[in-house]
Image (tube, rainbow, N blue to C red):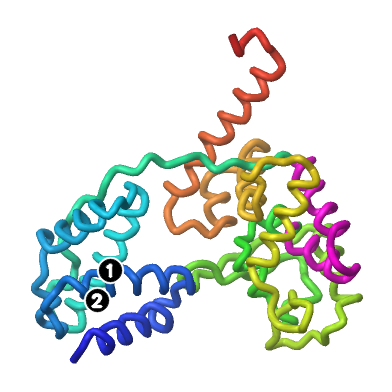
Amino acid sequence: MNSADILGQWEAHLALGKRRSPHTVRAYLAAARRWLAHLDARDWHALARLDARDLRRQIARRRAEGLANTSAARELSALKAFSKFARERAGEEDPDAPRLRGPKVKRGLPRPVTPDEAEGLAEQVAALARSDWQGLRDQAVLLLLYGAGLRISEALSLTGGDVPLGTVLTISGKGGKQRVVPVMPLLREAVDAYVAVCPHEQAKDRALFRGARGGPLGQGAVQKAVARARTALGLPSTATPHALRHSFATHLLGEGADLRSLQELLGHASLASTQIYTKVDAKVLLDTYRNAHPREKD
């Protein structure tokens, strides 16, 4: 067995077995490839014998190359997953990866946009689009991010079989985990308006949101549209498509939503991922107070 065989099986496990996103597959595959370049091990049994010291050496090697704490933590997570997979392939009784604590990462707070900014972005992407149907398309995508809390990948994974939208929508999120989100009338109207003028025929097995030539709309196209819109509106670079999902969560929390319900709506595997929005909500409140009372800035 050689490195190509090992990496091929690892890639298939991530993409098909675990149903990881293409981004995660690329990142985890690259981390394993870098590690294998420094190892003599070329079969699953040899890889299964690697321990915490081997992991520590690889992370130290990557840190010496200038890797920051956040990236080092991600790299370690990828390597531990690869190590666990190797142990499973080798038939080890205890397949758990070696225990090694990663570098401390200071978790930054998400930066939501205000309701007016979210509405402005949705209107501006439509105004700057190359055609009316593309404008309605981009507007519908952004409203799904802000009004239903979808990830951009989730919105773009919708198919013609999902329309017309009902009062709820079943979404397959990270790791194939499904959740049900409510769909407000405004979102249904926005999607219906796009479908009515889209020049490409809708089909159950085809992407709902289509590019100019009829292929699936890519995340990059949405991100570029938002970048143009926020420049025109004078909004900061933090006003991204993903910020609309953060805004959905923050505004719901501000209206009294409980964390467990919010966790389900966002599709978070861990409540810890949702709890960060309690800090965002407090920060927004403090910023509002300081803006209303300029003397508090001194």
Q: Position of residue 12 (x, y in %)?
A: 37, 85
Q: Which residue is drawn at 59% across and 41% down?
A: 111
Type of secondary structure dominating the magenta stretch: helix
Q: Quadrant of residue 212?
A: bottom right
- Residue on which disc 1 sits: 81
Q: Residue at x 38, y 77 (%)?
A: 14
What's the amino acid at mark 2? Phe
- Residue on which disc 2 sits: 85
Q: Does the magenta stretch include residue 132?
A: yes
- Is 271 in front, or is 80? 80
Q: Is residue 51 magenta?
A: no
Q: Is mark 1 on a helix, strand or loop?
A: helix
What's the amino acid at mark 1? Ala
Q: Quadrant of residue 62?
A: bottom left
Q: Which region shows up in magenta? A: 115-142
Dot 1, how many residues are within 10 Å of its Cα: few (below 14), some (14-19), or many (20+)? Answer: some
